[in-house]
Image (cartoon, rainbow, N blue to C red):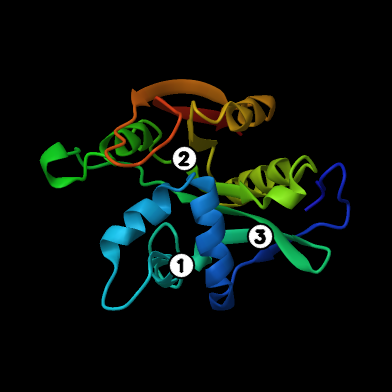
Amino acid sequence: MSFKPTHAADIELRKATRNDADHMAKLINLAGEGLPVYLWQEMIEGDETAWDVGRRRALREEGGFSYHNTRFAFGENQIMGAIIAYAQPDHFDPIDPAEIPAMFVPILELESLAPGSWYINVLAVYPPFHNRGIGSFLVRAAEEDARKAGKTSVSIIASDGNPGAVRLYERLGYTACASRKMVKEGWENPGENWILLIKEI
C-alpha cells in the first residue's frame, strides 16, 4: 500500500497469525477501554484468567475477533498497533433485547444501521507510539481492504468519552450518523453514548 504514517515511514502492515493472540488480546482491551476484560471475566472456564479468554477468542478461526480479521502496524522490530475489520452482513436479523446482554444492545442497534459496510471493530495503538500517524495508517489500510472486497462504505463505533478517537475519524472523512446511550452495568467509563460513524469510499 502507498500510504505511510507521517512520522514513521518504515511502518509496515502485517497480517496476524495464531502466534499473535497475546498482542491481540491486549490491543482489543485497549481499544475497548477495559470493556473486553470486563466481559471476558464472565467467560472464564476452569482455571483460566480473563486474559486467557481473550487469547482463546483471538485464536478462533471464525468470528469478528479472529486473527484472520486482524492487521498490525509493525515497525522498529515490534507491533505498534492493530486493526480488526471485516464485512458486515447485508441484512441484520431483528434484535431481541430479551436474548442479548443489555450492554450489547445499543452497539448491535448501531451496527444494524450500516448493513453491508466494512466494519472497523477494533483500532488500537500502544501508548508509546501515539501521535505518529499509526491510527490513520491502519484505518486507511482497512479502507483499502474494503475496496478490494467491493464495499462502498466503512463504519466504526466510538465512545463519546474518547473525543480524540472521534476527531481522528472525522479528520479521515467519517461522519457521525447515529448514537445510542451506553448500558454500562458494572463497567466504568466516562462516555455516555456510542456513536456510529460512516465513510463512503
Task: Please say whether residue 85 is visible from this viewpoint.
Answer: no
Is the residue marked by circle 1 packed among few (<14), some (14-19), or many (20+) residues within 10 Å?
many
Foreground label between 2 and 3: 3
Q: Distance between the residues labelled 1 and 3?
A: 14 Å
Is the residue marked by circle 3 packed among few (<14), some (14-19), or many (20+) residues within 10 Å?
many
In which quadrant is the C terminus drawn? top right
- Residue at image position (82%, 48%) is 4
Give the secondary structure at mark 2: loop
Q: Distance between the residues labelled 2 and 3?
A: 21 Å
Q: In which quarter of the image is residue 62?
A: bottom left
For badge 3, the amino acid type reads Phe
Seen in the image, is 36 located left or right of residue 9?
Answer: left
Q: Which of 2 and 157 is in front in this view?
A: 157
Q: Mark 1 highlights which residue? A: 58
Q: Where is residue 57 in the image (x, y as percent from the top left)?
A: 40, 67
Tell how many labels. Answer: 3
Give the secondary structure at mark 3: strand
Q: Residue 72 carries which label?
A: 3
Q: Position of residue 51 (x, y in %)?
A: 44, 66
Mark toward the start of the polypeptide (2 vs 3): 3
Q: Position of residue 70 (x, y in %)?
A: 56, 60
Q: Mark 2 highlights which residue? A: 117
